[in-house]
């Protein structure tokens, strides 16, 4: 809604000024539903109305101004701009009501089912003063029995009624008065006025329009948007003084934006980030506290059929039941108890075992005295124990009668929440009147969500001032009204005070079980000075929350230090275990590799040769040192008793290198074998322990190792594919020594199979020399001509 600044220039028309000034968020308040009934507490009635409507702009309900005394100041009503229900001004003695800011009456509820505005029996009322009222959407007008009232017959009511208001004909305006009224035409040119000042002239927004429902002037360009009500300041839907349907942040809309929209690209329904809930005639992003959000996007006080009330993240919602909804307990005014006035002997059995009641509870004198008109027997006070399990009440609690034998309301000792979604007389969620109780005894009550509390005419009641009502209320408009109860001074003189262990002196009655919170410990339901935690003791903080698990500051420090030390010790143990495990894994790996290496040896001779032979694919360091790398002479040394004797090249390049030359074959036996000389060794090829080749003389690039055979045995423990053994007299010679040859120097094809011994791969470096005379001190294939490291001499073919 658009609010007018108090200091807007007076030269412009009041209507335009009110719209051009910036708007603020509308303050919403609840209305009442007392009609013409006498106030529950006449002494506090005016204060109740003032507390309800002070600063309020939108009344969600009915605005009922009744039984105001003479001289009552009604300035607290000047901010009201919109009323959802009806406006009732009746039985007042004041001379004027301050509704000068009221613009629209929607008429969602009607007085006597017909009237949106009723002004009845006001003996002191002299003028209405509703200078800005320009729209009544539904309902008629009834003005009667106001002997001092003037100007009501000068109002053009047809201009105020909406064009679709079917009850506009229900208009009865009585002009009988006991005084002479000023001439309205002298004040206003059109002769329509609400009061005696020039500012009280009626503003016309319909009858002067040029073919549109509402306008701001007589020109065709002065028409308002179709969603406007009560007039406008411009043609847009954001220029409305009030909205015909829904107000979304100052913009009038036909509907609030839905919570879910359809995505035609993905063919699915997705949440609408601009979605709003419907709350009265407003669009809100969230439902107000104590209202229920429905799946269709509305804020309600009662869930629809086949839905149940749930709380998700402290938000109260209505959720559809996937199965038949669980049975709930209904109170007065709901379901089969709708229309029932009070709890009595015939319906109290329905409340047995209920922890939450959807509805209200009322205890009237007929509850305990019986009702002959309905043939209802008196209620046995012992049956009130069925309410001991009650924890939540969605409506109100009204008690106007109580058994004299009960000194408090102890049967409601477990009641925690009174929602107040339905209020007694539209105003009160808790009413206690004319009872003989000494204390309330509502020791578990933590919240009254809505409505005010009225406790009056209870001559024996104490401890009202000892209850922290401000912490129980959830809205700033809630308040306690209490009159004609026992004076606090008299209660203290009689010893009716809070137990000394009650925190902050707050309690619901006498004794250790009625404290709001405990100063020290709570054992069961009693406040005690000290006790063993094993006995079920609980420490409560100032808010009444249990803090028995809360450690002291010293305890926290000690626990932190001990915890840090434990973490350090655990980290050290973890590091040590990890290191030890890695060492063990390394040891097991080395042991496995050694075992696999030993298992690949075919004979002990092969094992000895493997230990003494060279295992690297590169020439020895002595062959690559120096500025030059000449190929050393091919020498085959015969190590025997006479020393090293070079063997002729023909022997080294024969097909069978172990065969003797022709001139030395005389000593063969009949089978062609030579008789070995005593105490001598068989001639080897090269590189005996006593004979080493000279280092190279010219620079060269060390030969790169050839590609290893796939799957060959190496230091990493892989098992190479086994090749077919060389079949011949040199099956124990080095197999596959071609990796020892420099690139570019071919190995004779005749001996290519003689170097396939996988034992030459990745073995440990050769030892400095073997023992002399050992047949395995030098491998049989280390002849330089076989390795391609020396030019062969002239070989006899």
Image: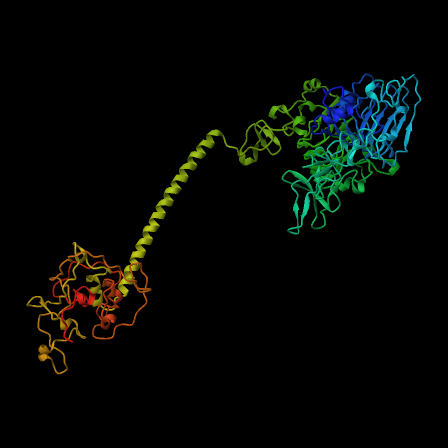
Left or right: residue 643 compared with residue 421: left
Left or right: residue 794 compared with residue 209: left
Q: Residue furthest bottom?
A: 670
> Does 148 appear above or below 389?
above
Nearer the observer, 514 or 215: 215
Left or right: residue 92 compared with residue 580: right
> Does 277 appear above or below 121?
below
Residue 654 appears anywhere in the view? yes
Nearer the observer, 704 or 474: 704
Image coloring type:
rainbow
Q: Quadrant of the N terminus?
A: top right
Nearer the observer, 727 or 309: 727
Q: Residue at x 15, y 57 (%)?
A: 697
Q: Quadrant of residue 647?
A: bottom left
Q: Residue furthest left?
A: 642
Q: Position of residue 726 (x, y in %)?
A: 25, 73
Q: Position of residue 626 (x, y in %)?
A: 16, 54
Q: Quadrant of residue 29?
A: top right
Nearer the observer, 355 or 572: 572
Q: Position of residue 735 (x, y in %)?
A: 24, 68
> Does 639 appear above or below 409?
below
Q: Residue at x 63, y 39 (%)?
A: 313
Q: How many marks?
A: 0
Q: Quadrant of residue 36?
A: top right
Q: Position of residue 479 (x, y in %)?
A: 71, 25
Residue 437 appears anywhere in the view? no
Q: Quadrant of the C terminus?
A: bottom left
């Amino acid at each position: 809604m658009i609010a007018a600044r108090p200091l807007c220039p007076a030269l412009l028309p009041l209507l335009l000024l009110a719209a051009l000034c910036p708007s603020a968020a509308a303050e919403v308040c609840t209305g009442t539903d007392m009609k013409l009934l006498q106030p529950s507490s006449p002494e506090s009635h005016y204060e109740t109305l003032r507390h309800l409507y002070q600063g309020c702009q939108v009344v969600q309900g009915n605005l009922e101004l009744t039984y105001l005394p003479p001289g009552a100041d009604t300035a607290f009503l000047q901010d009201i701009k919109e009323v959802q229900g009806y406006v009732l001004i009746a039985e007042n003695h004041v001379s004027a009501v301050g509704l000068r800011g009221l613009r629209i009456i929607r008429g969602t509820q009607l007085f006597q089912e017909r009237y949106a505005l009723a002004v009845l029996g006001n003996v002191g009322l002299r003028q209405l003063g509703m200078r800005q009222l320009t729209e009544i959407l539904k309902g008629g007008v009834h003005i009667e029995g106001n002997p001092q009232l003037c100007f009501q017959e000068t109002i053009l009511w047809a201009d105020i009624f909406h064009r679709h208001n079917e009850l506009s004909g229900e208009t009865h305006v009585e002009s009988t008065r006991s005084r002479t009224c000023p001439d309205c035409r002298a004040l206003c040119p059109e002769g329509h006025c609400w009061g005696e000042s020039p500012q009280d002239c009626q503003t016309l927004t319909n009858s002067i329009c040029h073919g549109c429902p509402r306008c701001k002037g007589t020109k065709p360009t002065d028409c308002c948007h179709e969603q406007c009500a009560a007039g406008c300041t411009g043609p847009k839907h954001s220029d409305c003084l009030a909205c015909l349907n829904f107000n979304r942040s100052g913009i009038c809309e036909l509907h609030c934006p839905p919570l879910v929209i359809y995505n035609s690209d993905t063919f699915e329904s997705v949440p609408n980030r601009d979605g709003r809930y419907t709350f009265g005639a407003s669009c809100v992003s969230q439902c107000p506290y104590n209202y229920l959000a429905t799946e269709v996007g509305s804020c309600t006080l009662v869930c629809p059929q086949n839905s149940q009330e749930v709380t998700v993240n402290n938000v109260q919602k209505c959720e559809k039941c996937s199965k038949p909804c669980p049975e709930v307990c209904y109170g007065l005014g709901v379901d089969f108890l709708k229309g029932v006035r009070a709890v009595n002997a015939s319906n109290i059995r329905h409340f047995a075992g209920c922890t939450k009641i959807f509805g209200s509870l009322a205890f009237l004198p007929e509850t305990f005295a019986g009702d002959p008109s309905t043939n209802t027997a008196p209620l046995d006070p012992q049956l009130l124990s069925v309410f001991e399990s009650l924890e939540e009440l969605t409506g109100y609690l009204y008690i106007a009668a109580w058994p004299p034998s009960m000194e408090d309301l102890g049967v409601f000792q477990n009641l925690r929440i009174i929602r107040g979604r339905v209020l007694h007389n539209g105003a009160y969620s808790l009413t206690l009147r004319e009872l003989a109780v000494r204390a309330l005894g509502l020791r578990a009550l933590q919240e009254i969500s809505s409505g005010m509390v009225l406790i009056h005419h209870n001559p024996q009641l104490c401890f009202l001032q000892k209850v922290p009502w401000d912490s129980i209320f959830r809205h700033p408009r809630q308040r306690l009204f209490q009159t004609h109860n026992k004076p606090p001074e008299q209660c203290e003189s009689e010893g009716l005070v809070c137990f000394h262990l009650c925190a902050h002196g707050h309690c619901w009655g006498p004794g250790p079980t009625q404290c709001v919170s405990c100063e020290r410990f709570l054992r069961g339901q009693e406040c005690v000075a000290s006790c063993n935690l094993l006995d079920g003791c609980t420490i409560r903080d100032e808010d009444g929350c249990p803090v028995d698990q809360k450690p002291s500051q010293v305890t926290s420090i000690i626990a932190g230090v001990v915890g840090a030390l434990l973490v350090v010790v655990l980290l050290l143990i973890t590091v040590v275990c990890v290191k030890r495990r890695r060492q063990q894994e390394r040891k097991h790996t080395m042991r496995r590799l050694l075992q696999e290496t030993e298992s690949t040896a075919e004979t002990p001779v092969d094992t000895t040769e493997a230990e003494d032979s060279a295992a690297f694919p590169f020439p020895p360091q002595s062959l690559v040192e120096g500025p030059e790398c000449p190929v050393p002479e091919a020498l085959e040394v015969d190590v025997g008793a006479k020393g090293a004797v070079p063997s002729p090249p023909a022997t080294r390049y024969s097909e069978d290198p172990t065969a003797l030359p022709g001139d030395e074959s005389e000593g063969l036996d009949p089978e062609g074998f030579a008789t070995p000389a005593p105490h001598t060794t068989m001639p080897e090829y090269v590189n005996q322990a006593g004979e080493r080749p000279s280092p190279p003389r010219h620079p060269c690039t060390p030969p790169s190792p050839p590609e290893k055979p796939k799957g060959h045995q190496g230091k990493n423990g892989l098992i190479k594919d086994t090749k077919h053994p060389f079949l011949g007299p040199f099956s124990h010679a080095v197999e596959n020594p071609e990796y020892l040859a420099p690139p570019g120097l071919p190995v004779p094809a005749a001996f290519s199979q003689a170097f396939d011994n996988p034992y030459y791969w990745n073995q440990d470096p050769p030892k400095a020399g073997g023992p002399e005379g050992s047949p395995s001190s030098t491998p049989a294939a280390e002849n330089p001509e076989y390795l391609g490291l020396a030019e062969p001499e002239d070989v006899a073919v």
